[in-house]
């Protein structure tokens, strides 16, 4: 387009200038020549106009009127001839004449979602000795460096070669002659797992850590250091430069390893090991006890890797599962076999819980050195009919005999207790009867005393009453005479008992000098009445 503007301007200017020579008027001829010059200048000016679209970037190459590039440089930063570091942004740009400049438009770098861009620079300062990636900078500084190539190659101190920083999703206006971008997937850490990063650049690691106090420390790396990083990535998506970092996904899920009989499991051959169909199924453990019995033991070992210990596991065993299984396999077998050497077969069978707790403590301590946490050790079947059948049958018979003896002893104890109970009950009954008799005696004595007291009281009462009556009779007799007093008392008794006195009184005459006849008659009548009442009763 710019060359077309230049050619049109030259042609129009030439045509106008040629026509000027045909005009006889000198003043008019000068005006036409001036117009031709203006058209030529306009054509030349229009040829320097360049346009860059909204989704493009302009690459400028200077062909003349400048010093050559320094050896080893591929981009110009000080107006040298060659491809310029600065790029043209979208829009119109002047003074880029076709002869002096070539303008090439390229599409913007577009990083889609779930991808990142790995960047490699074709120019810049050399990498430090022993480094294969440029030092890591902040994301804001890295964005400024790639979108301002001149800054990258000058004051930004950009390094030539692979960059440790990456481009996250978005559009970038960078110079494709300086930067090459490769799209890769983002790193995804699944649930129940962590990502352990190994940095391939940076200074030597300095962080020393260990899980068990009596173990050798593991050297891990901090940010900016080379080696296995102490900090892990938890579940999620991360823009990790998979060339600058080696990524190891470590499961943190609790896992059960079964040491059981069967065709599945872990097979040792010639000092090497290979996985069976299921890596969590291992060949059963065979132990030998102190009394010479050899038998298999069905074992379950539960383990997990804590996120903070995942870098130690990678540092000591690597990221693959096979070294971990091999270490766990040898540790469990050795500990179970060593523990069995100090006990007898029957004790081993009967003390399963003791063997579990003892083995758990020892296996946990050994695997902690590798960064692996043992959460449980379970013993299933111990031996079988072939290895422990006769011994177990003997133990069963012995146990039955012991139980029968215990039953007999318990029965004897029950009989003795029943006898003691009967004796106790009889003694209690005798004591009850004795107590009852004792109470009855006491009650009789008390009744006796009561009757005596009542009799004494009655006698005293009668005595007092008789004395009172005697005294009363005496006083009456002294006043009215003995005969009259006796008559009055007889009449009182007759009145109280309603005694009929008429017949006896009427037939009785008076007596001389002594007893009053009426009195005698009354007394006789009273006696008759009393005798008659006694007979009726």
Image (cartoon, rainbow, N blue to C red):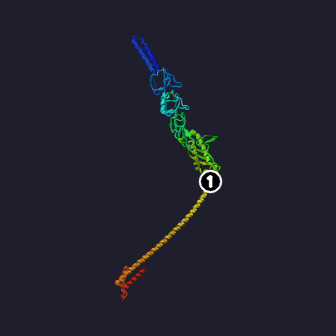
Q: Which residue is drawn at 61% across and 51% down?
A: 347
Q: Residue at x 54, y 65 (%)?
A: 424
Can residue 471 be seen here? The reply is yes
Most foreground residue, 169 or 215: 215
Residue 171 place in picture, x, y as percent: 47, 30
Which residue extends farthest bottom? Answer: 512
Can residue 174 be seen here? The reply is no
Residue 183 place in picture, x, y as percent: 52, 31
Residue identified by numbered label 1: 396
**As drawn, is 153 to the left or to the right of 23?**
right
Residue 55 place in picture, x, y as percent: 47, 28
The secondary element bearing badge 1 is classed as helix
Which residue extends farthest right? Answer: 292
- As drawn, 53 above or below 311: above
Q: Residue at x 38, y 84 (%)?
A: 523
- As drawn, 209 above or below 51: below
- As drawn, 471 above or below 118: below
Classify the position of the C terminus by image quarter. bottom left
């Amino acid at each position: 387009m710019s060359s077309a503007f230049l050619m049109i301007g030259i042609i129009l200017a030439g045509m106008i200038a040629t026509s000027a020579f045909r005009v006889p008027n000198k003043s008019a001829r000068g005006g036409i020549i001036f117009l031709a010059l203006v058209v030529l200048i306009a054509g030349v000016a229009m040829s320097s106009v360049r346009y860059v679209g909204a989704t493009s970037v302009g690459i400028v190459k200077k062909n003349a009127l400048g010093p050559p590039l320094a050896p080893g440089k591929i981009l110009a930063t000080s107006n040298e001839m060659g491809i310029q570091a600065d790029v043209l942004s979208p829009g119109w740009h002047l003074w880029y004449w076709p002869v002096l400049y070539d303008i090439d438009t390229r599409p913007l770098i577009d990083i889609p979602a779930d991808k990142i861009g790995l960047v490699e620079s074709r120019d810049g300062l050399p990498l430090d000795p022993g480094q294969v990636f440029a030092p890591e900078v902040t994301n804001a500084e890295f964005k400024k460096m790639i979108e301002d190539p001149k800054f990258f190659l000058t004051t930004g101190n950009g390094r030539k070669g692979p960059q440790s920083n990456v481009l996250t999703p978005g559009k970038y206006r960078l110079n494709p002659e300086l930067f090459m971008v490769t799209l890769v997937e983002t790193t995804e850490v699944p649930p129940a797992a962590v990502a352990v990063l190994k940095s391939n650049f940076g200074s030597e690691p300095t962080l020393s850590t260990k899980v068990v106090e009596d173990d050798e420390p593991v050297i891990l790396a901090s940010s900016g250091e080379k080696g296995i990083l102490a900090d892990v990535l938890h579940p999620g998506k991360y823009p990790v430069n998979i060339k600058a970092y080696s990524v190891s996904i470590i499961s943190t899920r609790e896992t059960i390893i079964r040491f059981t009989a069967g065709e599945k499991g872990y097979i040792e051959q010639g000092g090497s090991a290979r996985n069976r169909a299921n890596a969590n199924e291992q060949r059963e453990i065979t132990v030998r006890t102190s009394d010479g019995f050899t038998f298999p033991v069905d074992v379950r070992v539960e383990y997990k890797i804590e996120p903070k210990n995942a870098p130690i596991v990678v540092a000591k065993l690597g990221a693959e599962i096979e070294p971990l299984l091999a270490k766990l396999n040898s540790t469990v077998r050795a500990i179970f076999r060593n523990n069995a050497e100090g006990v007898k077969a029957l004790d081993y069978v009967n003390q399963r819980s003791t063997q579990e707790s003892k083995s758990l403590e020892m296996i946990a301590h050994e695997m902690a050195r590798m960064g692996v946490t043992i959460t449980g050790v379970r013993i299933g079947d111990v031996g079988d009919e072939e290895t422990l059948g006769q011994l177990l049958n003997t133990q069963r018979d012995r146990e039955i005999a012991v139980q029968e003896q215990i039953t007999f002893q318990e029965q004897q104890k029950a009989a003795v207790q029943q006898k003691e109970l009967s004796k106790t009950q009889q003694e209690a009954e005798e004591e009850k009867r004795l107590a009852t008799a004792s109470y009855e005696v006491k009650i009789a004595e008390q009744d006796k005393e009561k009757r005596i007291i009542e009799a004494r009281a009655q006698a005293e009462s009668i005595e007092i009453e008789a004395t009172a009556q005697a005294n009363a009779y005496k006083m009456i007799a002294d006043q009215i005479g003995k005969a009259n007093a006796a008559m009055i008392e007889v009449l009182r008794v007759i009145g109280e008992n309603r005694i009929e006195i008429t017949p006896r009184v009427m037939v009785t005459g008076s007596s001389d000098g002594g007893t009053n006849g009426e009195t005698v008659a009354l007394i006789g009548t009273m006696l008759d009445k009393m005798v008659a009442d006694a007979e009726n009763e």
